[in-house]
Image (tube, grey):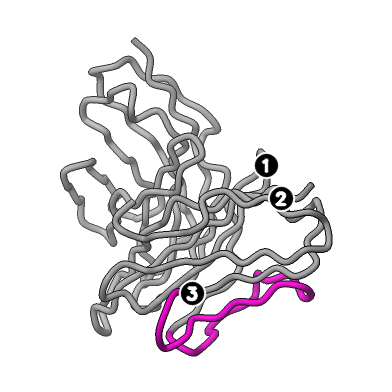
Amino acid sequence: NAGVMQNPRHLVRRRGQEARLRCSPMKGHSHVYWYRQLPEEGLKFMVYLQKENIIDESGMPKERFSAEFPKEGPSILRIQQVVRGDSAAYFCASSPIQGARASYEQYFGPGTRLTVT
Amino acid sequence: DAKTTQPPSMDCAEGRAANLPCNHSTISGNEYVYWYRQIHSQGPQYIIHGLKNNETNEMASLIITEDRKSSTLILPHATLRDTAVYYCIVRVTGTASKLTFGTGTRLQVTL
């Protein structure tokens, strides 16, 4: 999947625990996006970040979910006090900067499968 | 972003061309047509995008009608590995905005 790395690939958490999902974008990409895919459902946008900035968080649940993309290191999607309904595949994507006429195609990682027991 | 309409499923024999249609009748002049696919439960894969001219790359061809209200993704020689859900997405270019995935077309390539 074009070099976007996500870890862990599989994560099991008990209800009430915290889940941290990591995403390293492709080299040279400074835009990161998180999407969620619930079982048997489509992909839903969650949040779009650039380095140290949240640009669009219109798809993020209001509570328990947060995301960051620090100056150094991977982007982190954090889910506090997980519930069974958080069980899903979480995909990260990154896109390059190509200037004002950029098409900004997104390249996806393999995803993290979160299971809440 | 404009809404897209795709058939829920299609079949194609291996080795034949797969032609996946997409309607986007409300597309605006500054919106591109993007195609992605998701093989089983893997991360979506970018295929191709275009504005108004036909486009071709190593994976596929994209044919956009002159009025831009519909397009067709063509996989010239489908293989079993092309079995996937294909998403047609319309999106404003020049902005690194989110992708809005619909339900897509589930393409089944058979022997």
* Residue occupying the point 71% across, 50% down: A87
Q: Chain under label 3?
A: A
Residue B11: give its label: none
| Label 2 Cα neighbours within 10 Å, binned few <14 / some 14-19 / many ≥20 | many
Tell me which label, 1 or 2, sits earlier in the chain. Answer: 1
Tell me which label, 1 or 3, sits earlier in the chain. Answer: 1
Dominant secondary structure, magenta: loop
Image height of A111 relative to B59, above or below: below
Can you say which quadrant of the picture contains the C terminus of chain B?
Answer: top left
* Residue occupying the point 49% across, 79% down: A49
In the image, the segment drawn in magenta is A51-75
What is the three-letter code of the residue carrying label 1?
Pro
Per the image, the residue denoted by label 1 is A39
Q: Magenta span has B53? A: no
A92 relative position to B14: left or right: right
| Label 1 Cα neighbours within 10 Å, binned few <14 / some 14-19 / many ≥20 | few
Per the image, the residue denoted by label 3 is A75
Element type at marker 2? loop
Please state the horizontal and vertical placement of residue A26, each as a whole percent of the image: 31, 67
> Toward the viewer: B37 or B66?
B37
| Label 3 Cα neighbours within 10 Å, binned few <14 / some 14-19 / many ≥20 | many
Element type at marker 3? strand
* Residue A6 occupies quadrant: bottom left
Per the image, the residue denoted by label 2 is A87
